[in-house]
Amino acid sequence: MDDKPICYRCRSEIYHHQGTAYYGYYIAHRSPDDCTVYLNRKIQELEARLAEQEWRPVTEKPGHDGRYLIAINYYGRPYTLSALYDHTRDRWQSLNEEMTPTHWRPLPPPPAATE
């Protein structure tokens, strides 16, 4: 098993060429600035992933066919349900006339399989 050193401050993997400082049993980047660079990059990645999951108005069409979570007005009351989007017909499948979609978002990934 190949254990890679992890910075105890920012929890990022440390590569040998980065330089390290040892604090007893702990290992860290030599400079806290290295941690700041890593953490800022990680924040940007997480914000981008979060933005992908945001609700979008139906005027913004999904980029491809598939199942999405949609918000609808059904007889004036808000509901959420999953529906298929047909890109070739530019319409949501499985909706009757009383269901007016207002927003959509990608479905979250399924839970990890457990044994």
Image (cartoon, rainbow, N blue to C red):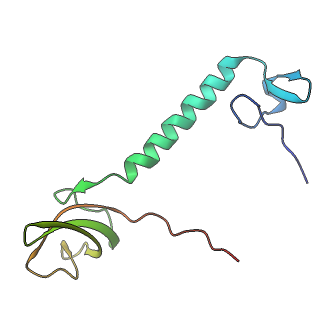
Total numbered labels: 0
Position of the C terminus, as image quadrant, is bottom right
Position of the N terminus, as image quadrant, is bottom right
| Residue 49 image offset from top left, x and y in percent | 46, 48
Residue placed most toward the observer, 59 or 109: 109
| Residue 6 image offset from top left, x and y in percent | 79, 36
Residue 55 found in image quarter: bottom left
Residue 101 found in image quarter: bottom left
Q: Residue at x 49, y 36 (%)?
A: 44
User: Position of 63 compared to 109: left or right?
Assistant: left
Q: Residue at x 68, y 31 (%)?
A: 10
Above or below: residue 99 compared with residue 13? below
| Residue 58 image offset from top left, x and y in percent | 18, 60
User: Position of 94 compared to 38: left or right?
Assistant: left
Q: Residue at x 28, y 72 (%)?
A: 81
Residue placed most toward the observer, 64 or 49: 49
User: Position of 23 compared to 111: left or right?
Assistant: right
Q: Residue at x 84, y 28 (%)?
A: 27
Residue placed most toward the observer, 17 or 110: 110
User: Position of 1 compared to 80: left or right?
Assistant: right
| Residue 14 image offset from top left, x and y in percent | 78, 33
Residue 19 found in image quarter: top right
